[in-house]
Amino acid sequence: MAPGPAGVLTCGVGGVVVKMLAFVSVWMGLACLLLALGMLIYRPLFNDVSLVVLLYFGVPGTLCLAGLVLWAHRKNGSADPAVGLQRRQCKVAIGLGLAAAAIVYALVIAAQRVSRS
């Protein structure tokens, strides 16, 4: 990690700004949780497409982005309050993603097989 313009940490691969990854991870986690709650309340949302989107892209993406930001700030003993807030955002994103995955896995376990004929 090297300081980029205005002292913002940037990732060496593609120059991705770490500051925005925390923000994106929280919104992805919230979207995952809303989709999981939608599946819980409105059963037609509980289909193959929404399961793939949530379990293969949404939750892992949220955890990956949040983990990347936490990893980027692992040795940063900065007194900057933004670093602490980014860490908190990442912890919230991880919690939202895990809650969404837990809801969906509970729905999968409790689902009954429906015959298609």
Image (spheres, rainbow, N blue to C red):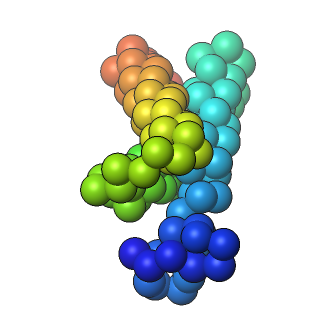
Quadrant containing the C terminus is top right
- Residue 5 figure quarter: bottom right
- Residue drawn at 71 percent across, 19 percent down: 42
- Residue drawn at 49 percent across, 39 percent down: 84
Which is more toward the observer, 111 or 16?
16
From what the image shows, is residue 13 above or below residue 94? below
Q: Is residue 36 visible?
A: yes
Q: Is residue 53 visible?
A: no
Position of residue 74 measured from the top left corner of the image (x, y, whole percent): 30, 53
Name the residue furthest front.
79
Position of residue 107 measured from the top left corner of the image (x, y, whole percent): 45, 20
From what the image shows, is residue 81 above or below residue 111? below
Which is more toward the observer, 32 or 55?
32
Relative placement, left or right, of 109 versus 49 is left
- Residue drawn at 51 percent across, 69 percent down: 9
From what the image shows, is residue 21 above or below residue 30? below
- Residue 14 figure quarter: bottom right
- Residue drawn at 35 percent across, 50 percent down: 77
Position of residue 49 measured from the top left corner of the image (x, y, whole percent): 60, 48
Which is more toward the observer, 77 or 66?
77
- Tag count in the figure? 0
Quadrant containing the N terminus is bottom left
Position of residue 94 measured from the top left corner of the image (x, y, whole percent): 43, 36
- Residue 7 figure quarter: bottom right
